[in-house]
Structure formats: C-alpha cells, structure tokens
Amino acid sequence: MGHGAMAQDAAGATQLPEITVTAPSPIVRRNVTPVRAPARAPRAVAGRNREPAAQPQPAPVAAAPQQGVLPIVTDQFATVTVIPNEQIRREGGATLGDLLFSKPGITGSSFAPGAANRPIIRGLDVNRVGIVENGIGGGGVSDLGEDHFVPIDPLATNQIEVIRGPAALRYGSTSIGGIVSATNNRIPDALPSCAAAPFRTFGLPVKAPLANVQSPSCVTVETRTAVSSVDRGVEGGVLIDAGAGNFAVHADAYGRKAGDYNIPGYPYLFDQTRPVDGRQPNSAAQASGASIGGSYIFDGGFVGAAITQNDSLYRIPGIEASDHQARIDAHQTKVNAKGEYRPDSAAIEAIRFWAGATDYKHSEIALADLADPTSLGVRQNFTSKDQEGRVEVQLMPFNARFASVTTALGLQAGHQELTGSSPDDPTSPLGGLFDPNNNNRVAGYMFNELKFTEATKAQIAGRIERVNLSGTMPGFIPELFDLNVDPAGIGPATPRNLHFTPKSASIGLLQSLPWGLVASLTGQYVERAPKPAELFSRGPHEATLTFDIGNPNLGIETAKSVEIGLRRATGPLRFEATAFYTQFNGFIFRRLTGNTCEDVACVGPADPASPLELNQAIYSQRDATFRGGEFQSQLDVGEFHGGIWGIENQFDVVRATFSDGSNVPRIPPVRVGTGVFWRDANWLARINYLHAFAQNNIATVGETPTAGYNLLKAEISYKTRLDSSWFGAREMLVGLVGNNLLNENIRNSVSFNKDEVLLPGIGVRAFANLKF
C-alpha cells in the first residue's frame, strides 16, 4: 500500500463523532446534543383527529470515539479537556486529582495520593477551582484543606470535563481557575438503550439481532473492577440502568481498598533517622459509595432525582501525621434533582433546573500522646451542610440581521454552613479551626451567543452575585501577626457579617479556519468574594500542620484574563494549543510567615532552637500575575499490522509572580512529554514519557525547591463485543497499565507535605470492564 493510501486510511480512521460536553455553557446546540427526550407528537389541527401522544423511546446509541484517540473540543470558546468513559476505565485513579495529574495545564494537590488529591488548574486551586457532579457542587470541604477528600469517585463517573475560561461564570466567581465537572447516569435523562445485539431484556436472552428494534423495557448492567500492585489495591463497582414505559432508574455501588503504597526511595527529605520499609508510612485508604435514582421521561423532557452516600477512611502521610497515626473518617449524604423541558414555544427553547443538598462530616483522628496508644481519638471535626439550586432558560435564536443570537438566562442560589470544632480540647480559647459560619449567595447570569456565519461566532456573558458571609473572629491584634511574640492579644470571639457584590463579564470569539483549524480568543473580568475559611480561620489545622489565621478585612479579588487558542479535532493530526495571561488584583493566598505556633503560643524565626509544632499561615492579599500555556497533539503516522501507529506530545508551563517580582508559592513545574501508540478496532497499546523540570521558583518563606522527575507509563487494552450466550456479557474492556516504570522518586511541588511524601513507585494495574 502506498504512502498516500496509508495517510488516507489514517485520516478516515479518525473522523470522530462530535464530542458531547455538558458543562461549558448553558447554550446547548441541538446539532451536537444527543436526543434526551422523546420526540413530540404532531399537534391536533382544527377539524381533524388529534394524533396520539408520542411514546418515550430510548436515546440512540452515539458512536463512541476510538480507543486512544485524543478528544479535542473545537466548538467552545476556551480550552475544554475531556476524559471520556473508556479513558477513565483505562487510566484508573482513585481521585480526580490522580486521574488528571498529568494532563496539560492540570495537576493534583497530592497531599494523600489515592485519597486526598484535589485537581489544580494552571497553578490555581481550592477557592478558585470548582468541582461539580451532574451540574451541582460536589460538596465536602476539600477547599478548606489539602488533606480533605473530594466526595466524587472515578469508579462511579462516566465522563470528566475540565472547563477553563468564560464558561466558568455559569457556576460562580469561585471558579476563576476553572471547573472540574464529573457526570454519570445517577439521574437518567433518557431511557436506557438495549438496541445492540446480542442483548438481554430483564434477564431473558434474545437470539436474533435487533439493531433496529427498541425494547419497551430494558435493563443494562456494567461491572468495573481492577487490582493494583503498588498498594495491593482492589476496587469494584456495579452500575444498573433500567427503563420501562415513561420511567428510567439507575443504581450503583462501588468500593476500593488499598494498603500503604510502595515508594522507590526514602520519603523524608530532611530527617534521615526514621525507619521506612519501602512503603510510604501511613498512606492506606479505603472508600465506598452507593446511589439510587430515577427519572420520569415525558413528551418534551424529563425530571428526576437521586440519593447518594459516599464514605472514605484514609490515613495521612508525613512525619507528624504518621507518628500520630493520623487518619480521616469522612461521610457524605447527597440528594440531587434535575430536569429539562422543551416547550412548544416560539420564544423558549428549553428550561432546565438543578438542585442539590449535601450533609457532610469528617473526623480527623490521631493520637493525643505518642506514648499512649489508648489516646487515639478525634482531634478535629469538620461539617458542611450545603444547599444549591440553579435554573436556566434558553431562548430560541432570533435574527438580529448581523447575526443569529441565542440567549440563555440563569439564576443560582446556595447556602453553606461550616463548622470546624475541636472536641479534643473544648476549653481551648480557640476551640477549633473556626466557629460555625454561614455562606449565603444568590446570582444571576446571562450568556449571549452570536452566530455571524457558520465559521464565525461570538459569546458575551455576564454575572452578578450577592454574597453574605457571617462568622466569628477572635480579637487577634494584626500588628503582632509577624512578630516574635505570643499573640496575647487574643480576645473573645467577635461576630462579623460581611457582604460582597462580585461582578464578572467575558467576551469570546470563535473562528473556523482552513484545514479543520479553529481559533479562539477570549477576555474575562472576574471578581471573587473571599470564602469563610479565608476570613474566619483562627486556629490549628493539625493535618496540614498549620496554624491558620483568617483576615476579616479581605476585599474582593479581581482577575483580568486573556486566552488565545488554536485547535484541530479531525484528520491524522489533532492538537490544541493555548496561551493565557491573568492579572490578579488582591490575590488571596495562605502565606507562611516562618513563625511556628502551638495552641495560642507562637515563636518567630529568631528562635529556631524552640520551634513549635505548627507553621503559622495568614490569609493575605497581594497583586499577582499568572501566565503560561498548554499544548497537546496526536499524529497518526500510518498503517502498521492492520492498525494505526502514531506519536503524541504535550507541554505545559505556568509562571506566577507577585507585583514585586517574588514568586507565588506552590506552582507546578514546566512539563514536557512524548509517546507512541498503536491501535486498531480492538487493541490499544501506548507508552508515554513525561519530564517535569525542577521547580526553583519558590516563595521566600516556607517553601523549598523541588527536584525534577521522569514519569514513564505504558498500557495495553483490548475491547470487543461478546456473545452473551457465554456468560451474559455483551461487551468487554480489559487491560494492563504500568505507572512510574522507571521507579523514580517523584515529589509534587504544589503539595504542602512534598518534602515528606513520595508519589507511588513502579506499579501495574489490571482492569476489566464488562457490560451486560
């Protein structure tokens, strides 16, 4: 076969269906959205008999992207990273941070790998990165401490979207850095489809192929299992979807358990005296969860709800935490609802709503006395009760002569009550990290999309919020914060009620170019109100070994951003390249002072001979600038042994400095990677190498340089349809994944405990995914 024919085959092999993303914008285009609700029956006409109402039908089965093909989203106004279901199954990862760790522009906090690892986007974390599940905040308190887990498990997730840029205005100003959106089928928006042969209906085998026949009743089952060598881990989940008539139901349950993970070297950088047996001490974890939900599918839409339980028990690595056998026992109950209605209206195209309530609690457990094993008990409790709702109305497009204009209006409201008590020492003048505090917010937003031609589109969006925060702050004397004295000025707790009105706006341009290229240019102005922890913290946070001091005088944080991108999604070469620049006014950050504290007593750096247990951290504001970019590409080189082989590359960089030229703390390093792959209709094999350069651009106080590392990964997987008469399964995906194959010492520069925690060493993960 000639080279021209090979290139043609490669191009034809990668003509992908449109990638359906759900999170970026409230404006949903019909031509890229799968059918969610049954088609509407013709209306009765005067003088004629009325047609019978249309019956709900299963949604058509969308063509799935080929295994290993880089998913590039070209119809959005800023970069969207999509991790589809098969990639989640192949790569695994116990947390969102584990799963996204090596994606361009994204990493994880890695405080407790495999347990507490929150995503970080372009060097921004916690209060600037939102995490949602099925359109509603994920709940929990992962934004209050790097040791806290995110109660969303990849085992129960079908797709992950990382949203940057203007679309984040849909979710709130606390998502300046971006949104990590996890979706699953816990609230079905369509009847399940069993229109693939062979298949089973309520356990009864059907022999003949029925590809064009829709069953009025249907049950599908999926199992997800894996084992891993590095931590002797096991995981498993089962998902069930059923539908009959107008009703669809879903149920799932999952669990995972892992021991202390293997490490290549000695974990403690500045203390070489402690015995270590080749594993990261105190790093074991386990988690489980279950959910049940259902929807009513009707002519023009659906409405549904689900209840979910998430539980996690995990240990915290690090010297102090290991000595005290520190662990976190977390539980969350979540109730969510959502729906959509497409009325037969000349003005309104769709009405959608989301609502959710979560009840979260975790206990931080540790020894009070190292010499007394019976002193193991609760040192700190965190609770969070959240309620959130959002309603969106998408109007029908109208012709404004110069463009076709589509408008979507949204209203969002939420309430959160936080506590951070210390039952270990209720007589302490502090009593915990903070007293109960409340966060009430209401916001309205508008997205306008202007279609000038098929090739040129623009978006203009705006948001205004009202944020009311109430809590208490002890009478610290700010002038003493950085001095080498005890903060004896602590007085009684003083109630504070604070009010903010953040306003945000964005504008974007999307331009199709020759050769399948799409260019984008966006500008944003985003204001963010401080979060309660930034305002009201005033006590020890044992797991992060910090004494956190909030500042009730913090003002609104402002970010002005520009992003430019170029993407190509089809053909043998697929890539996306993005560059960004963000100027922060009043950037809020947790500043380590160099002082150490214990209870209410602190000493300064002038007394290194008597350091206390906790590092003093004060929430502060300074102007800062973030700039950088990301690139990833995949090239199908040609045919090889009946499949396609090719190469892939990636690069990301972020540089962050304050106005005086000093460095913003805990920023990811420059990373560059490459790899080769081979795939056909069933097999996928790939090997990838990622190099992270040393991070020496560090804060002047409280941060140390981080060495570079080389991360080598390899995978092989096999996907096929099965004859269900064997054992009932109709589709199978199995594979092996090797991680850190060079067995390198890897430290994550953004982690608070990086000098005491190594990431896992060489390991192999075997997985199997079956659909019935």
Image (cartoon, rainbow, N blue to C red):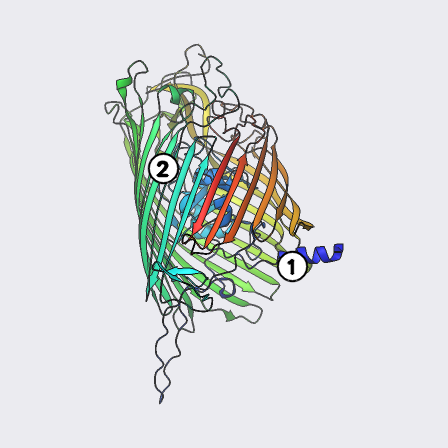
Residue 717 on image: x %, y %: 54, 45
- Rendered position, 458 above or below 271: below
Asked if the residue at tag 2 contacts the one at tag 1, i.e. Cβ–Cβ closer than 8 Å, the answer is no
Identify the residue at image location x=31%, y=51%. Answer: 292
Q: Residue furthest front?
A: 726
Quarter that holds the N terminus: bottom right
**655 left or right of 502 in image:** right
The residue at which mark 2 appears reads as 287
Left or right for 469, reference 111: left
Depth check: give the residue in front, 409 or 455.
455
Residue occupying the far bottom of the picture: 47
Q: Which of the pair 165/23 is nearer the observer?
A: 23
Q: Residue at x 44, y 40 (%)?
A: 226
Q: Secondary structure at mark 2?
A: strand
Q: Which residue is mark 1?
A: 12
Residue 6 shows in the view: yes
Q: Amino acid at mark 2?
A: Ala
